[in-house]
Image: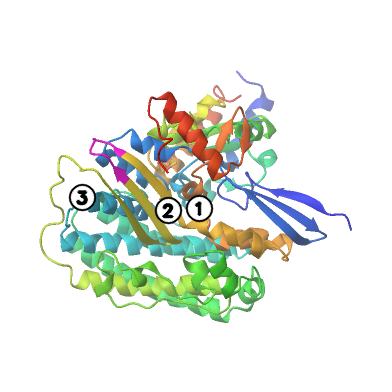
Amino acid sequence: MPKITVPLGPQHPALKEPGNFMLLLEGEEIVDATLRLGYNHRGIEKAAEARNFVQATYLIERVCGICSHSHATCYVTNVENIAGLEIPQRAKAIRVVIGELERIHSHLLWLGVAAHEIGFDTLFMYSWRDREYVMDALEALSGNRVHYSMNTIGGVRRDISKEAHEDILKKLDILEERTNYYIHLATQEPTLHARTKGVGALPKEEAIRRDACGPLLRASGVARDVRKDDPYLIYDQLDFKVITSDACDVFGRLYVRVFEILESIKILRQVLSNLPEGPFAVKTPFKIPAGESVTRYEAPRGEDIHYVKADGGPNPARVKVRAPTLANFESVSYMLTGDQLADAPLIIAAIDPCFSCTDRATIVASGKQSVQSLKDLRTYGIEFYKKKGIDFTKVK
Amino acid sequence: MKSIREQVAAWARTKSPWIIHFNSGSCNGCDIETVAALTPRFDVERFGIVQHGSPRHADVLIVTGAVSKQQKDRLVRIYNQMANPKFVVALGACAAGGGVLQNCYGVLGGADKAIPVDLYVPGCPPRPEALIDGVVKLLSGIKGVENAK
Ligand code: SF4
């Protein structure tokens, strides 16, 4: 049988964001998959260098509309590290509250999208309806539904009031009940099993070898979670489990995510029931000294890594974002190979891809896109800065 | 005065506008709010609005995000594939004029740099209510026949 190549994307009803997958098919079976990224590359890292440290916080937040708090927290933590700021306990707790609410909303969102991909639109509508509870809570706390802008260098921008506090606890009760229903559904519903079990298999060794992260890795049986392994904020004082599954397929990813919602609810209850008293922000120093810092953060999709370099000037000298989806893309082509074409959208959706986070570097010269080796990129960079009068040739 | 035929066509158009959503380089915030507008809390389906995957079936193109240089040609192509009459909604600050991303090297600018836009919905991201308000305005514009193409 002749092999044919089917492009999937960049505009495709199954993908909410632009990305391109070249699927090589033999009949219905996918024998090879190549990935092309870069449709969403905007140049945020460079733009951050043209803004001062505070302005860049709100720019970095707009790297991604789903895990905006993750990116912003990562960035401000870096800046605080460089400036040597110790932020108040209350600020840390509030950051955790927003972070966990964000995780719940992201997982419910994923549940809906995945349900839509398997043609289970009732579940899609259900989970998005319940997601509105979280959105209401986030809005009550921060004033916005998507870009919360809660972080600022030195703490958070708003306090949690007594009323908001009680309101969230009430919403958590509803959410817990609904999550238990989803768990029931995920474990009992035969159609869901039939559609997700054995699809997009990623064995444990392969997941580790391909550096997967987040729920994708945990669904392959590896208990790795930055919140536990390298606790930041106040996660070391909290009691929660790292959910794993040995299913190694889309079903496992579903399982991990719904149970993680329950864990997040548990964390939220703990934090809210003894919110530390005191101020919620310290004064930002006028000048950020030279220095550099790297932070890791467990975003809803996995490990998010940011690097910030300061040179003593008003603007960051370099900001680098490594979004979790980038790490997970390595596994996608492996998971696609050997599966049916009809499952491709589900498999891609199962890593919960976020292209806007991921599209960090492509070179577009006169309309042609090209892949560059690190060496080429380095030469290109040196030439670029030479034109500006800076010589980097001596740097090893 | 429009002919009876045109009036009937305009009436029919306002009953069930099908939308297609195109992400031209958005941060996802506007996209999830578009999807949220389709779900039970906001439910734009009561206006007959259904999201559709194919540009050939859609009447309204919702563009989210600043148009990245990579996506520009694709956006124009999708626009050209849509059958007349077609309407374009630029959703969010980015699609309206680049938003925070204006002057980024990978960004061309707002959606109107690539295709004609009929309606701008501001916000970062606009609340689903704002989107619904925008679409209703668009529909009454079509009904008012003057603006209809
Ligand atoms: S307007 Fe705001 S939410 Fe919408 S794409 Fe732009 S940055 Fe994201």
| Same subunit, tags 2 and 1 | yes
**Residue type, mark 2 in image:** Ile
Magenta range is: A309-316
Query: Marks 2 and 1: which is nearer the front?
Result: 1
Label 2 belongs to which residue?
A: A66
Mark drawn on residue A354: 1
Mark 2 / mark 1, whichever is N-terminal? 2
Q: Few, some or many C-alpha atoms within 10 Å of disc 1 (few <14, some 14-19, many ≥20)? A: many
Mark 2 touches mark 1? (CB < 8 Å): yes
Query: Marks 1 and 3: which is nearer the front?
Result: 1
Residue B120 shown in magenta: no
Mark 3 touches mark 2? (CB < 8 Å): no
Q: Quadrant of residue B80?
A: top right
Residue A214 seen by the camera: yes
Q: Secondary structure at mark 3?
A: loop
Q: Which quarter of the figure is the C terminus of chain B placed in?
A: top right
